[in-house]
Image: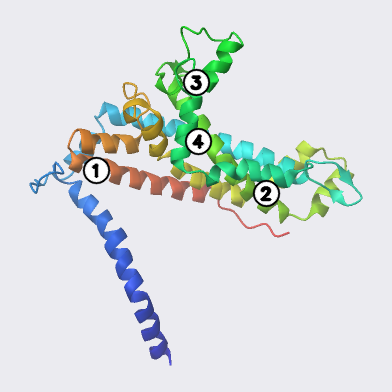
Amino acid sequence: MRHGKARFVTGFLALPVALYVFYVVWPYAQAVGYSMTNWGGYSDTQEFVGLANYVRLFGDELIHKAFWHNVFFLVTLPLFTIALALFLSFLLNVGGRGDRAGVRGVRGSGIYKIIFFFPQVLSLVLIAIMWGAIYRGDSQGLLNGILIRVGLVDAEAPLKFVSDPTPFLGVPAVLWWLLLIAVWGGVGFYMVLFSAAMQSIPKDIFEAAMLDGASRVTSFLRITLPLLRDSISVAWVYLGFIALDMYALVFMMTPNQGGPDHASEVFASVINFTAFNKGQFGYACAIGVALAIFTLLLAAVQLRVTRRERIEY
């Protein structure tokens, strides 16, 4: 019986596993192989160079710049997105007035959830077109038009937004404007995620805390956050992956897909620039492999640090 079951399972999984190996595992293996060559991408000539491409990474100024830009997103994107999503989800679930029926969320919380989640259903092309009109660097742009009308910006010198490499708090201004788009686009999803987790927490806990004189801030810090730690940990890992990518926004929103003057370069855009502009596919593969290893190590560290015993309630 067991042998028959094993044959059935093997036969059932053989084709999916073969397809996965061919379309997923094998391209990764090819990338590792190409990363050890000086392949130009447009010819069959491939000279084996060993780890020379990986050694080159440590002295590449463009890689250093892209690394710190990714670190900026890695710190700020999860922090701002999770903080705002937690605040909104707490407000929508237990931020209203308490009555005989217990603690309630704010009135119309269901509508607010739909509104905040709406960016998730938009395609990236629509988001780029919309924010391109908002960030337009002349008086016809939405933000510039508003700022000019209220007298905060001179009509002859409008803000450049995603074309502005001027440092702000030590970081190019263009990265802050890209961060705003990323937070706007992601906060709704994580608000819904945290709302679902909060709804699984018995309302009796919040009501007992209120009867004991705990304020909303205290109940949030002492009750909600500890019970949402697992959800927050998962969200932090997912947002970490997004922060280490950011290619789509950089490609579609910035001049020269990483400009101006490489002020918005990230690892993914450097891979594209190195492969298709410089014709150095072997070196680009090395950058991609290094990014994949760094991402896996970061996820492992994050899960290790945030791991704890599960709280039952």
Location of residue 292 in the rendering, given as x and y in whole percent from the top left corner: 34, 47
**Whole-Å distance between the Cαs marked 1 and 3?**
40 Å
Q: Amino acid at mark 1?
A: Ala
**Whole-Å distance between the Cαs marked 2 and 3?**
35 Å
Q: From what the image shows, is residue 173 above or below residue 243? A: above
Query: Can residue 222 be seen from the camera position used here?
Result: no
Q: Amino acid at mark 2?
A: Ser
The residue that label 1 is drawn on is: 286
Q: Is residue 64 left or right of residue 223?
A: left
Q: Amino acid at mark 3?
A: Gly
Which of the labelled discs sits on residue 195, or is there none? Answer: 2
Comparing labels 1 and 3, the label whose residue is closer to the camera: 3
Disc 3: CA contacts within 10 A as few (<14), some (14-19) or many (>=20): some
Location of residue 262 in the rendering, given as x and y in whole percent from the top left corner: 32, 25
The residue that label 3 is drawn on is: 141
- Considering the numbered disc 4 on the image, is that residue within a helix, a strand or a loop? helix
- Considering the numbered disc 1 on the image, is that residue within a helix, a strand or a loop? helix
Comparing labels 2 and 3, the label whose residue is closer to the camera: 3
**Whole-Å distance between the Cαs marked 4 and 2?**
20 Å
The residue that label 4 is drawn on is: 182
Nearer-N-terminus badge (1/2): 2
Location of residue 108 in the rendering, given as x and y in whole percent from the top left corner: 76, 43
Q: Is residue 249 left or right of residue 309?
A: left
Nearer-N-terminus badge (4/1): 4
- Location of the C terminus (image quadrant): bottom right
- Considering the numbered disc 3 on the image, is that residue within a helix, a strand or a loop? loop
The residue lying at 20 percent from left, 40 percent from top is 283
Residue 210 image-quadrant placement: top right
